Amino acid sequence: MSTRTPKPRLAWITTALSLLGVLGTPTIACAGEEKVIRIPMTTAGPGDLDPVEGSTTYENRVSSTFYETLLEYEYLVRPYTLRPLLLEEMPVVEQDGKLWKFKLRDDVYFHDAECFPGGKGRKLVSEDVVYSWKRLADPEHTYENWWLVDKLIKGFNDYKDGQAKLVSEGAKFDYDASVEGMRIINDREFEVELTEPNQQFAWKLAMFQFSVVPREAVEAYGTEFTRRPVGTGPFMVHDKKDWVIGSGLTVYRNPNYREAYYPTEHMPEDVKAGLTEAAGQRIPFVDKIEFGFYVEAQPMWLKFKESTLDYTTIPQSGFEEAVSRRTKNLKREWRAKKITMDKVPLLDFIFRSFNMEDERLGGYTEERKALRRAFNLAMDWDEMNEALYYGMALAYDGPIPPGLDGHPDNEQHRVTNSTRGPNYDKAREELRKAGYKIGPDGKAIGFDPVRFYTSQGAESERIVSLLQRNFEKVGIKINPVFVDFPNLMDVTNRKNAPMFSFAWGSDYPDAENNLQLYYGPYESPGSNHSNYKNAEYDEMYEQLRTMPIGPERTAHIETMRDILIEDAPFCGSLARTRVYLTHPWVRNFKPTETFYTYFKYLDVDMDHPLRGE
């Protein structure tokens, strides 16, 4: 879940995270008192609340409160595992992994909404799932998330292409036309036939883009549907005014949510952390979630210190204040306030990317590759780690984060054909190969500045300042363009950014999810925002999707990784450890950025004496 959150995420990591929970027991509010939890998001907010158009971690985080998928992650269990959410049981898989049979729960209802007769939400049926997935094929949604199902379900590509032709001729998209590989048995049972066995399909079924929506709401609200979500989840939006663009979003407890309970499955360390004391209790615990959007981190940080936010991530400017540089633990005065700290290693791919269709930076000649490698070699990821992430991140080669097959798991996290800087002498050599002369000062002569798009905010400005210092040593120049995140997505979707800054959080724990970022057919507005195209790589990616887990698959992944490093469509990489601070009145919080269905498990002690209003 890109932060693109890609946040895809954009996952799917099999290493246990070292997480500390929050001590305490579930609380019961006084009669008539609302339980409210206040959640910060370091962004201007989601760009879209329609799951088929959402692609970032911010959209995932919000949408997961009111939309649901067939499967979800076990909240407390590591390594990550899946369990049924809208399903009565896990799918039955037959025909060597090609045929998937599903059975829906019998107690799931959509939110009460005006689009239904009498305003009463109706029961979820199989047709809702098929309809929701067909929306991925509708050109009205610009195929934003088509990459998730491309060539995956039998007959689905033919359906997409046939409908696109009809729409281009002026006809209406036909949601009632059949898809060969999607077969409804009855209101609760359906089956999906894949084109080939697929290692990642189960993980995709837990992604918010596969959320189930009612056709009535989409057709009744039209373009307003993105601001008027109707799902089956534990929370709901009462009015489109609940979303104030750039400021915040409020969601409310769904009074008709089915019987669901806090999980009993857990890790041994969760007991001491107090994360098991609510086991078996009915959820959700809070009446309202207030999401606050913070383009600048400092206001968020101040609100947390004022006790008017319930938890926060530590911004770059806050590490010195709260964390010991020597021990990397919370300072004594913060521990005295019963604030807890959780260090969450992310399945993170932080990178600076090139548009491979750009007239100057793109292309596949040796000269163009050399130019992009020069950018790589001039960047100091270790300095960035120390200056911006308090030395708690990890620099590595390639697009595959630690914990996944294909990550260079050695002391330096380097590969043999590494171009990760800083190595200014080699950067100058690559600039010469790219056709630049190097002056007596060691800098490229006549290097025109490159437009570099990145998110606005003080932290981004610090990153750009560091990049400019690095690049200046060899004469590379960039002109930064600071935009909010929705506009950054827009400019990259339209292929108008020569160079840009992105973060991708893996959507599931498999290197395939990161390698698909460079699969040619997924070019913008799909997930391949670099617009990278390499026939050999594309063929290897298609082979990868069906390969069984094992040494042969790992070697295959490593070859694909090294092709990318050679062609250099990006500069990278860095994996962050996100540091969460939580106030003592928050219960049941085990931070993760792999999934966001956990808000229904959070609880608060509204009467805690330190809690601010």
Image: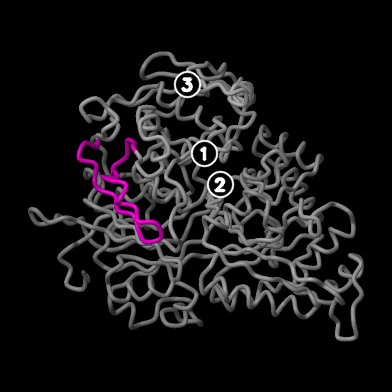
Give the label on residue 101, or none.
Answer: 3
Say left or right for 554 vs 171: right
Amino acid identity at mark 3: Lys
Name the residue tied to disc 2.
509
Amino acid identity at mark 2: Pro
Marks 3/2 in contact by CB < 8 Å: the verdict is no
Real-space Cα separation, disc 3 to disc 1, in angstroms = 16 Å
**Furthest-left residue in this view:** 31
First in residue order: circle 3 vs circle 1: 3
Amino acid identity at mark 1: Trp
First in residue order: circle 3 vs circle 2: 3
Image-quadrant location for residue 610: bottom left
Name the residue tied to disc 1.
203
Say left or right for 515 vs 267: right
Judge the density around disc 3: few (<14), some (14-19), many (≥20) Cα neighbours within 10 Å: some
Marks 2/1 in contact by CB < 8 Å: the verdict is yes
Marks 3/1 in contact by CB < 8 Å: the verdict is no
Please, what secondary structure does the residue beneath circle 2 have?
loop
First in residue order: circle 2 vs circle 1: 1
